[in-house]
Amino acid sequence: MSRRHLKAQRPEAGEPDLSHMALSRSRPYRSARQDRGAETRAQLIEAGLDVFGVCGFEGATTREIAKAAGANLAAIAYHFGSKEALHIAVAEHVAKSMRAAIEPALADVARHAARSSPGTARAAFGRLIEAYVEIIVGSADAERWARFIVREQMQPSAAFDTIYGFMTGPVGVATRLISVATGRPEDEETKLRVFAMFGQVLVFRVSQALVTRYMGWTTIGERERLQIKRVVAGHVEAILTGISN
């Protein structure tokens, strides 16, 4: 190998070694850094979901969230800019996760919302409520989502707009189905009945500790979930029959 070739490969004394700089600009290196950055961001959101859910926005600290995520405190500022922005990102994560969970059922019943017979609309609403039970009571993540959402309901922040934007979709479809099923307009009473019927499902998550202890259950598993579905379905049928008569 010629001296000229060696000089091209090895820098003279005092010259910077550009091999590391070249590596830092390589595609695999950049990709690895991006992957680690995306993973850290996701970990901060998951940690934020837990800490905000337990402590609320005011009570949560960025130091506690960073520690729970196993990340540097500066990572929050780098990825989100502020505690407020992280809080909104968590709300967006919750809305996206719940939307993905309920979307198949929602798409199935939404086509019955506009034009259908009362019987078809009633059956479609029953399927929607059943799916809601499965998501709220059956999902392992639902307890974490519920804690965050309930806190936003009690003390709305800028993140509430995100939660509200998601929740009005299923509520709107349900209101139209109940209107068709009962022959009533989409008035205040119909909307209140929709909230009441969805609320009877949410109580099994929000008040899970009370329910399980009083019922003598250790947890809400498949058997318990089937019982809840049966009771809720009976309530819905009785309510809709009473309204329609």
Image: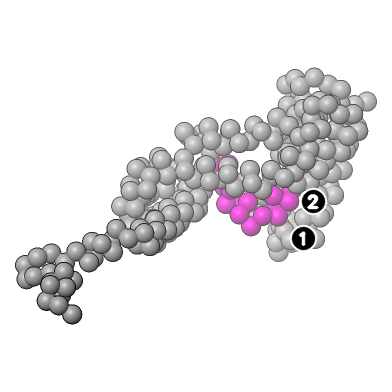
**What amino acid type should be assigned to the residue bearing mark 2?**
Ile
Residue 67 visible in this rendered orientation of the protein: no
List the residue tagged with mark 2: 228
**What amino acid type should be assigned to the residue bearing mark 1?**
Glu
Within-10-Å neighbours for mark 1: few <14, some 14–19, many 20+: few
Label 1 vs label 2, nearer the camera = 1
Q: Secondary structure at mark 1?
A: helix
Q: Secondary structure at mark 2?
A: helix
Tell me which segment is drawn in magenta.
132-150
Magenta stretch: residue 17 in it?
A: no
The image's colouring method is one colour
Residue 123 visible in this rendered orientation of the protein: yes
Quarter of the view holding residue 201: top right
Where residue 94 appears, x then y in whole percent? 56, 45
Q: Is residue 85 left or right of residue 148?
A: left
Using the numbered discs, state the Cα–Cα distance from disc 1 to disc 2 in whole angstroms. Answer: 10 Å
- On residue 222, the disc is 1
Within-10-Å neighbours for mark 2: few <14, some 14–19, many 20+: many
Placement of 210 over or under 115, stated as above or below? below
Where residue 15 appears, x then y in whole percent? 9, 65
- On residue 115, the disc is none
